[in-house]
Image (cartoon, rainbow, N blue to C red):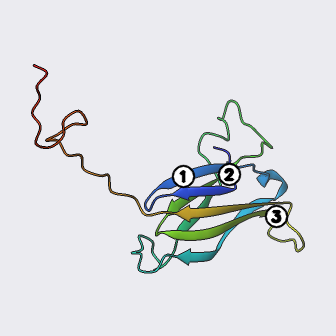
Amino acid sequence: MELPATLVMSPGETLTFELPGLGGAGYLWFVEVSDTQPEAGSPSLGAELGEVVDAVLARSAPGLLGSAEHPQVGRGLPETLRLTAQTPGTAAVRMIQRRPWEDGPPRDERHLEVVVVAATTPVEADTDSTLDELPGQEDTQH
């Protein structure tokens, strides 16, 4: 799934995105979640009260390295970003790709706004009448 500029999620929902990897050259992705603005009075599903979204990076994927018979030496493996919506509100997610031992600007940088909205309860339908029948009228089409 391509990384959008804005993402709307419901509490408890988890989405994953692949980020292009350059681990063989020493570049790794790092993620920061900031500017969280939880809605007042919203219960949190996260480990930290008021956390809008949880972001986790997975640096390796089983099976992508090839097999003993067909190794894929030097291949850049994608890193996986997993976002889990915790509580209604807005969060800014910043991903940077850099070498951990180097200072200076990152090689690549991506930004994502996550808006977590409370799940709405479906409206229960009145099963005693239909659009063709008004209350107090009987079906006369028999």
Query: For mark 1, what is the residue?
Result: 15
What number is the disc on residue 98? 3
Task: Residue at 65% x, 57% y: name it.
Answer: 6
Marks 2 and 1, the one that precedes in the sequence = 2
Distance CA(mark 2)–CA(mark 3): 21 Å
Q: Look at the image and tell me in which quarter the N terminus lies.
A: top right
Q: Secondary structure at mark 2?
A: loop
User: How far apart are the two marked residues, 2 and 1, measured between alpha carbons?
Assistant: 12 Å
Horizontal side of residue 12 vs 53, given as left or right:
left
Q: Amino acid at mark 2?
A: Pro
Q: Position of residue 66 (x, y in %)?
A: 67, 36
Label ID, residue 4: 2
Q: Please name the amino acid that badge 3 sits on.
A: Arg
* First reached walking from the N terminus: tag 2 or tag 3: 2
Label 1: element kind: strand
Placement of 51 over or under 84, stated as above or below: below
Nearer to us in this view, 53 or 67:
53
How many marks on residues? 3
- Residue located 72% across and 46% down the image: 77
Q: In the orientation shown, which residue stands out farthest toward the top? A: 142
Say which of marks 1 and 3 sits in front: 1
Callout 2–callout 3 Cβ contact below 8 Å = no
